[in-house]
Image (cartoon, helix red, strand yellow):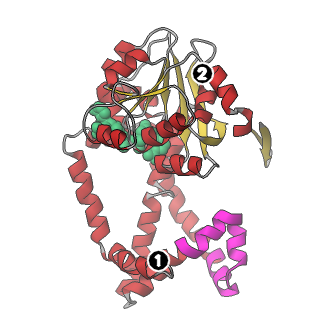
Amino acid sequence: MKTIEIMGYKETIIERSDYPPDKIKDILNDEVTGILGYGPQGRGQGLNMRDQGFNVLLGLRKGRSWDKALEDGWEPRKNLFEMEEVCRKATIIQYLLSDAGQIAAWPMVKSCLNAGDALYFSHGFGIVFREQTNIVPPPNVDVMLVAPKGSGLSVRRLFEAGTGINASFAVHQDYTGRAKERCLATAFAIGSGHVFETTFEHEVTSDLTGERCVLMGLIEGAFRAQFKVLRAHGHSPSEAFNETVEEALQSLYPLINENGMDWMYANCSTTAQRGALDWAPRFEEALTPIIEECYDRVRSGKESQIAIDSNSQEDYREKLDRELKAVDESELWTAGRALRPLRPGG
Ligand SMILES: NC(=O)c1ccc[n+]([C@@H]2O[C@H](COP(=O)([O-])OP(=O)(O)OC[C@H]3O[C@@H](n4cnc5c(N)ncnc54)[C@H](OP(=O)(O)O)[C@@H]3O)[C@@H](O)[C@H]2O)c1
């Protein structure tokens, strides 16, 4: 456990060494963990727990996820069951269905909860937007959260690499007096590297804002805008792609990741440094009101309502596939597909 101080703001970081496997096994000794859902998170968290010998069952409906679980070696009636059966057996339910799926399955899950059980989420969505989701756990269960800061594939890959993903944790309801201990033990059982404390509200507002803005939506919009301008001025697709995407991902962003923004600047030409340092405040000024608007829409529940409405439709997957296909077939990403294999060694 480490206390860090960032310009006067003190935070406690809990590390994997604080929760070695034997300690986790002691804490979870009498527990049966039931994971509902085998999307990226269910798969990553479930395999990491299974590999370490924790008592974990998967609860799935028959279909796509069930078939994937079979491919990964989960065995029907041994550690793979229909959802309701797992809900009845488990003392900790890891609720890792899609956020829309959580709404649909909630009446069944709620009916299976016993006093002292723990309900675990990897997102504050269901609880915070309870007026839209109707997910209101009874008062006699623990309610906790571990939110990995990355996709379930990274949860799995970083665990396999022997490191682990950063995650936040929170306790929303502590009926047993053991909620924090159960939460932290589970956080490290699923393969977290280090964890920091949050609340369900902060987790969901930062997460929904982050993915709509810098992590995904904003970056896609910025790539598209610059590629469009360069192409409109007669630059070839490979030049526009290299100056927009390839150099960013292959050269500059890894330097930011390695040692911070100043390190990236320090390794660029003085011409690049001057220009970027001058233009960064222009983008900050232009983007702050848009990010502020997005944050307000997240907090007011408008963004969660859109997500629920669209992801609850029967044909949401077909519609999503069509949208992603359109992205993939745009000139920008067609250029990417043509150029990536030409990377040395690629
Ligand atoms: N992905 C991330 O980067 C990430 C990161 C941190 C936290 N989280 C959170 O982790 C949770 C799980 O997310 P995810 O990305 O792993 O998975 P997801 O793609 O959101 O969910 C997929 C799973 O939900 C099941 N499902 C959906 N609707 C269902 C229904 N009505 N009944 C039964 N099962 C249903 C699917 O089963 P079928 O295959 O049978 O359809 C599949 O197993 C979410 O709360 C998410 O916000 C995600």
| Label 2 beta carbon within 8 A of ligand 1 | no
Name the residue nearer the viewer: 72 or 332: 72
Q: Is residue 28 left or right of residue 6?
A: left
Mark 2 lies on a secondary structure that is loop
Name the residue nearer the viewer: 198 or 13: 13
Outermost left residue: 315
- Residues under labels 1 and 2: Cα distance? 45 Å
Mark 1: few, some, or many residues within 10 Å (few <14, many ≥20)?
Answer: few
Q: Quadrant of residue 167?
A: top right
| Residue depicted at 54% across the width and 26% down the height | 144
Q: Is residue 10 left or right of residue 281?
A: right
Secondary structure, magenta segment, majority class: helix
Note whether residue 156 is visible.
Answer: yes
Marked residue nearer the N-terminal end (1 or 2): 2
Residue 224 part of the magenta segment: no
Q: Quadrant of residue 96?
A: top left
Amino acid residing under circle 1: Gly
Question: In the rendered image, which residue does mark 1 sit on?
Answer: 346
Amino acid residing under circle 2: Leu
Q: Which mark is residue 28?
A: 2
Question: What is the x, y in percent for residue 126?
Answer: 41, 30
Mark 2: few, some, or many residues within 10 Å (few <14, many ≥20)?
Answer: many
Mark 1 lies on a secondary structure that is loop
Q: Which mark is residue 287?
A: none
Q: Quadrant of residue 22?
A: top right
In this picture, is 266 found above or below 271? above
Q: Quadrant of ligand 1?
A: top left
| Residue depicted at 27% across the width and 53% down the height | 320
Assign the N terminus to one quadrant of the image.
Answer: top right
In this picture, is 315 found above or below 275? above
* Range shown magenta: 249-277
